Structure formats: structure tokens, C-alpha cells
Image (cartoon, rainbow, N blue to C red):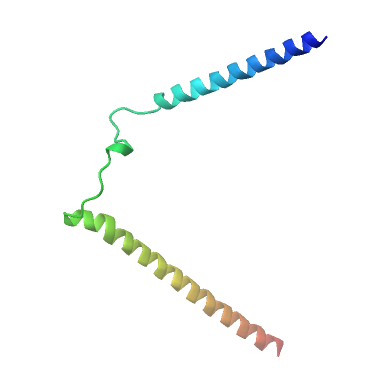
Amino acid sequence: MRLKEIEKYLKNIIKKTFLYFLVLFFSITASFGQIPQGVPKPQDNDPVAFNSLSDVIIYVILPALLIIIYLFILYRQRKRRRKEDQESARQEKEINR
């Protein structure tokens, strides 16, 4: 009886080891299969050189301008909400009097 338990235990270990090997093998081959050809890769990228005006506009001025516009829109919305809240509170006070 003890021998059957050991045999069963070894079979389970072999099955698990084989499954782990298969998962590892297919994950490695799948990751290599996903690399497209002719597309810039992260190791081929160079840092942005700000020598030309277009690079400065695209990478510095436009993002800063978008952030400023976004913050301005948020400010106006908050100001409008505060004004509406104050007016509604004033109307409620008048009604409760």
C-alpha cells in the first residue's frame, strides 16, 4: 500500500513538472512570436533633440497649453457650480423665511 502512494505521488509530480514546462515553453515562444518586424522597438529609440522648432512646439508648448486650457476649464466649472450653489442656498433661505 505504501508503494502505491509513492507511485501516485511521483506521477503527480511528473504531471505538474511537465505542465510547468509546457506553460514556460509556450509563453516564451509566444512572446517571441509577438515581436513585429519593421516597427520601432524600445531599444532603438533615441532621446528627443530640441534642435528644431517643431520638436519644441510638439513636445513642450502643446502639452503645456493643453494642461493650461484644462485647468482653466476646471476653474470655470467650479466657479459656476459655486455660484449656482450660492444662489440655490439663497433661494432656500428666502423660501424658509
Determine whether 62 is above or below 12 in the image. Answer: below
Q: Position of residue 44 (x, y in %)?
A: 27, 37
Which residue is nearer to you in this view: 2 or 22? 2
Q: Residue at x 53, y 74 (%)?
A: 81
Q: Quadrant of residue 58?
A: bottom left
Report the residue at 57% width, 21% height from top. Answer: 20
**Which of the 4 image quarters holds residue 56?**
bottom left
The N terminus, quarter of image: top right
Q: Position of residue 43 (x, y in %)?
A: 30, 37
Give the x, y percent position of residue 8.
73, 12
Total marks placed: 0
| Residue closer to the observer: 88 or 54 | 54
Q: Can you name the residue that lies furthest to the front here?
A: 2
Residue drawn at point x = 74 percent, y = 13 percent:
6
Residue 2 lies, in percent from the top left, at 81, 11
Q: Is residue 1 placed above or below 44 in the rendered structure?
A: above
Of residues 9 and 62, which is closer to you in this image? 9
Residue at the limit of the structure toward the left, as seen here: 52
Question: Image point 69% across, 13% down: which residue?
Answer: 10
Give the farthest residue toward the bottom.
97
- 25 on left or right of 19: left
Q: Quadrant of the C terminus?
A: bottom right
